[in-house]
Every structure is written in structure tokens, then in C-alpha cells.
Amino acid sequence: MADASDRPPGAPIRRLPSGIDEGSVFRSLFVAYPDSLLLVDQSGSIMLANPSAAALLGYAEDELVGLNVEALVPDGIRPRHAAYREAYGRAPRPRPMGTHMELAAKRKDGSEVMVEIALSPLQSQGLPFVVAAIRDIGAYPRVKQALQRARYSEHLAQLGRLAVDTRDLQAVLRHVPEIIARALEVEVAMVWLLDSNRLEFRVAGGVGLVPGEEIGAHVANRPDTPPGFVYAQGRPVLVTDYATEARFRVPRAYIDAGLVSALAVPLSDRGRVIGMLAVRARESRRFGDEEVRFLESLSSLLATSLQRMQTEEALNHAQRMESVGQLTGGIAHDFNNLLTVIQGNLQVLEELPELAHSSHGQRLLAAAARASRRGAELTGKLLAFSRRQVLQPAAVDTHALLHSLADMLRRTLDQRIRIGIDTAPGSPLVMADPGQLESALLNIAINARDAMPEGGTLRFRTRICDALPPGLRNERNSPEDDGTTHFVAISIADSGTGMPDGVKERAFEPFFTTKEAGRGTGLGLSTVYGFVNQSRGAVSIDSQVGQGTTVTLYLPQQQKEAQVPAAAEELPGGDALPRGLKVLLVEDDAEVRKVVEAFLAALGCEVFSAATADQALSALDAGAGPFELLLSDIALGAGMRGTKLAVEVQQRFPQLAVLLMSGFSSELLEADREVPQSWELLRKPYSRAELARAMAKVLAGRG
């Protein structure tokens, strides 16, 4: 509130027209003011409160009058607030909005709201009061949008986790509408699936369903029906008000249920519409661009999940391993792009000043970050059993690795489990990715622990083999196996319950698990299978009920004398990048492109962005540049790929550094075999720090 002292010296004092009472005007202003206003005396008692204050704090206006302001201060900061108020009372001064962000108000029901408070002392007017103006910062459009996006990201990651964790189609269709309804805070959410004859839509799942659209109900696929209209359009459809909707026939049940607005997006499988997601609300104009993007992202994840599940049902035992591996590579590509957007935006949101001191906002961000990290971990498991992960083989000392792993297991497993190690003389070195090998052994050890609930013996053993056992050699069927490779067999044996033949035969299948619901994804042994086969090795299981299980990994032995590599020297971070670095960014996914642009801007780079290789080349032809670094996705839609673009650009600018990225690990594997050593490859999703390290590495090797 303005103080009289704010008036410039010599400025005329404007008077109200005659006949208008100043007191009435100021009382009306106090009541009508949109911010919450409290008039507080020197003892902290509230003398007046306007309706906005009562609504914000959950009191009636007369309940606030006479209440001490200390009652509105959260318990945890009350002593600090009392000291501040005492000091302020000795030297009152105007304090505008925005100078203190760490403020919270306690409502009548005990809940808290993050606020900003402006103070205007009236002592200069001869009045022993202070006016406090209070504003809910959650009402700020930018903060509100940031919190909304964080909530959407959290629920999107929840669906991603569900899609990866379960192979039960009905469970997914049951939970998806619940996730959507919670995320968008709507009354109705549903999944429509198109029947195989493509003549009717079936309600496959939903919440808040109206009569005539119960689960299992069918609706004709015609342009005059709600789902049929979306099918005909082939794109998201917004309904701002059913009462004025004329594009299709609105069922009477929608109006009777009080539904007003709606949003629907198609579910597409390889370019063909197979269904749709629909949400409805009792508010008009309830849905906007943010909701469309969220529902489209969720639709993409669900369609991919449905594709996976339907494919699995059509596979026999022999086909399943390879086909699901190919399928999960596609899931990983889409999911890694989504995770790049989610994690990148979360990192940007986390650093916004408006959220830096918002405990509620930080809790939402932390939950979304945890969910996205879980999604990234599950994607990594999918890539492992599909043999599409990027491995970094090195000579591994099995003696040192097994002893280190055993030390850790002795501290973490049941104390009733005895651990023994029997390594071959000379500590044979194997060629494998050290981190993935340790993870595989740990997976097997955890399974062994679960098979010994009352304790037992877990034994690690290594031996050198001249060749793979005949059955495994045929299964491996690797063109690189010329019969001269020697192997190190690493066996992990337990004295547990063992496996019946039916379980043993399916043990390496993805998503197969004998554990109770919620205790496993069924990806443990399948990731071991994928890792070992990708490492040009093989794996076997020997098990009998009541006599324990032995899992043996056969990995290539290091042929040439080589030192076990020391830990890689830490790459330089973002602050090693030269300020003003000129970067040509080429990324076809608009949301990913925005995230990378924000990362590069934060790293002090000058960025020129293009969605396709043709756009990038046209910009170069028009005189854009010169650039110092090309940062390009490998897959750039229907046109030129990022690898070919890099070749053409580097022909024009030989000193240009090249950094390629992809969410599809098979693309990175292919590129790793084809591109020059000086180029760097970066896997999605990545953080800003990981991007900076990759950029610094490729720039350091440029000359």
C-alpha cells in the first residue's frame, strides 16, 4: 500500500469530488482489494481483515479480528518470527513484495500456504498500525504452470514405470485412467480401443464413466460419435463447451452428468489409430496446450506398451527372446526422449527463483525426479536383455572383482548365508564391461538369497575353458566365434530351493518371475542373458528342486597381456567449456530441443537450432556460423540422418567438433562402429553436467 511519503516533493494533493466521503472510499478499497489485507496494531492483534484474507487463511472475517498474527505463523518458525516482529516494531519501515521468499502462512485447518508479504507502517500518518498485504505465490501464473508441469511429469513417469513393470494388459488399462484423472484433476478419464474390424470402439478402461459408456460398451466408429470424430480427425480434439458443440452428436448422458469440456487424443501404433484417450470436466475451457502435450505423451507411452503386450501374446517361446528385444529397443527410444524432456525441465524448474524456497514445489520436483530416475533404470534393464546397451569392454580381474563383491554381500545379505570364493590360479582376466559384469553377478546373488530364506551357502568359482559347451556354442551362434577364443567360466552356486524344469526353461525370459506381485520385474536374469551374449559369451543354469542352483557365465578370456585399466580420469565439467561456444544444435523432437537449448544457454553457449538436417544445411548455405561444435541427434525423421549430416558439415568445417546423441542404443552401437574416433556419442536421457562433460571431451580431442 502506498505511503504518503511516496508522493514526489511538490506534487499536488488530489482531492475527492465533493460529497464523497473519504472514509467510505478507503473502506471500500480495503474490502475490494484482491490481495489479502490485515490491519495489525503494535501488540500484533488484528484490527481489520478483508474478505481475501479470510478466504486465503480459512477463517471468517470476524474470526480474524482480535486474533494475534502469531496464530498465522507456522509452529516451526514462530520463535524467529516473534524476534523479527519485535525488531520491526522498534523501527517500522515499508517492505515491498518479493523481498522475502521464505514465508509461509498457517491456515485455520493447520495447513500451510507459501506467501509473499508487504508491510506498510501507518505511523507517519499518526496511526499506530501496520498494514500487511499477503499474496499466495502459488497463484502466480509462472509458478502455477511450473508446479503443474512437475505434477504432469510425475504422473507420466508413473505410467512409464507401470508400462515397463507389468505385462498384464488389463492392469494397465485399469490404472491408466486413474493416473490421468489424478494428474489432470478431472471427473472423467477413459481409454477407447478400436475393435479389429475397425467399425466400433470399445471402452477398455475408465473412471467417472456415464451411462452408455460403461467398461465393455461399444460405440460406432462414425464421424457423428465422439470417438469416431476424433478418429476421423486423426489429431487431438478439444471441446470447450458441449452445449454449443456442433461437430458431432453429444450424448444426452454427458449433459445430464454436468460435463462441459473435453479433450481426446488418438492412440497410434506405427501410424495407425488403434484407440484414444479422452478426458472430460465440469468446467468450460478446462484444457489447454499443457494438457494436450501431457495426454499426447501419455498416449505415446500407452500405445507402445499395448504394442509390446499384444506382440508378446503372439510369440511362442523360441521367438519371444528376440522379438521382445527388438520391441524394447523401440520403447527405450521413445521413453529416453521423454525422460530427456522430463529430467531437463525438472532441472530447469529446480533452479527457478520462484520455487527455490517453496517446500511444496520442491517436494513435487523431488518426487518427479525420483520417478524419472526409476524410469531410466528400467529402460537400462530393457536395453540389457535386448542386447542393445552400449558396453565398454575392458580387461577385468575376476579375483579382485569377486572378492570385492563378496565383501559387500557379507555386509548386506542375511548373516546366515555363508559366502565362499574359489578362483582359478593366475586370476584370469575376462573381456567385459566391468560395471555390467558386477551388476550381473549381483543380480544372480540376490536371486540366490531369495532362494535361501533360512540361510545357506553361496559360492563363487572361476575356471578356464578352452571352448563353450556344445549346446551353448550352438545357442550363441556368434559370427565372431572362430573356435580360437578361450573363456573364463564364473559360477555362482547356492544351496537354496532350486527350480523345477518348467521354471528353469523360462528363467531367462523377460518379464518372467516366480516372485509375488510387486517384488520383481522379471528382468533380472534376462538382463544377465543379454549382457553375456552381447559380450560374446554364454550363460547356463543347472538346478534341481531341493538341491540348489548354479548359474555359470562364460566370458571371453583376455588374449593379449594387458594391464587392467585404471579408473578413467574425470572429464572436465561445464566450467571447462569456453564462454560463447558456438553450437549448431539439430534435434527433430521440439520438446527435447527446448531442453537442450536451455542446457546450452546455461553453459554459456551461443546456439543455432534446427529441426532437420536440411534446415541445418540451409542455414550454413545462408552464412550461419562458423560453428565450433555440431550437436545432433542421430535419427532426424524421414530425411538425412545425423551421422551423414556430420560428415557433410565437417567437410565444410574440418575443425568442427562432433557430438552425436540418441535415445536408441542400437543407433549408438551402429554409430560407434562407423564414425571417426574423434566424434563423441551421448546417450539420452542425460543431465546438463553429462552434456557438458561430453562436449568438453570432444572439444579437447579436436586438435
Image (cartoon, helix red, strand yellow):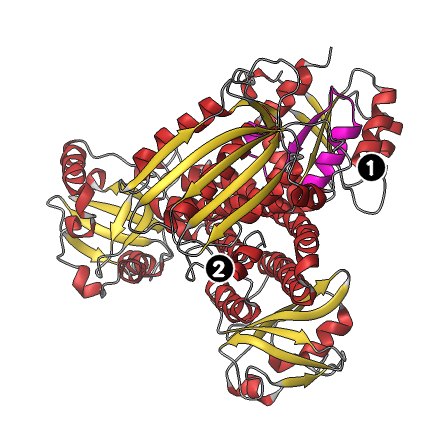
In this rendering, the answer to whether 69 lies above or below 56 is above
Q: Are marks 1 and 2 in contact (CB under 8 Å)?
A: no
Residue located beneath label 2 in the image: 500
Distance between mark 1 and mark 2 Cα atoms = 55 Å
Q: Which residues are magenta?
A: 665-690
Q: Which residue is under mark 1?
A: 613
Where residue 534 sits, quadrant-wise, is top right
583 or 7, which is in the foreground?
A: 583
Dot 1 alpha-carbon crowd within 10 angstroms: few under 14, some 14 to 19, many 20 or more: many
| Element on which disc 2 rests | loop
**Residue 521 picture location, percent across and down:** 49, 54
Q: Is residue 482 left or right of residue 408?
A: right
615 sits left or right of 454 in the view: right
Is residue 580 among the parts visible in the rendering?
no
The percent position of residue 267, horizontal first and vertical second, equals: 68, 66
Quick check: can you spot residue 697?
yes
Kind of residue sitting beneath label 1: Ala
Is residue 452 part of the magenta span, yes or no?
A: no
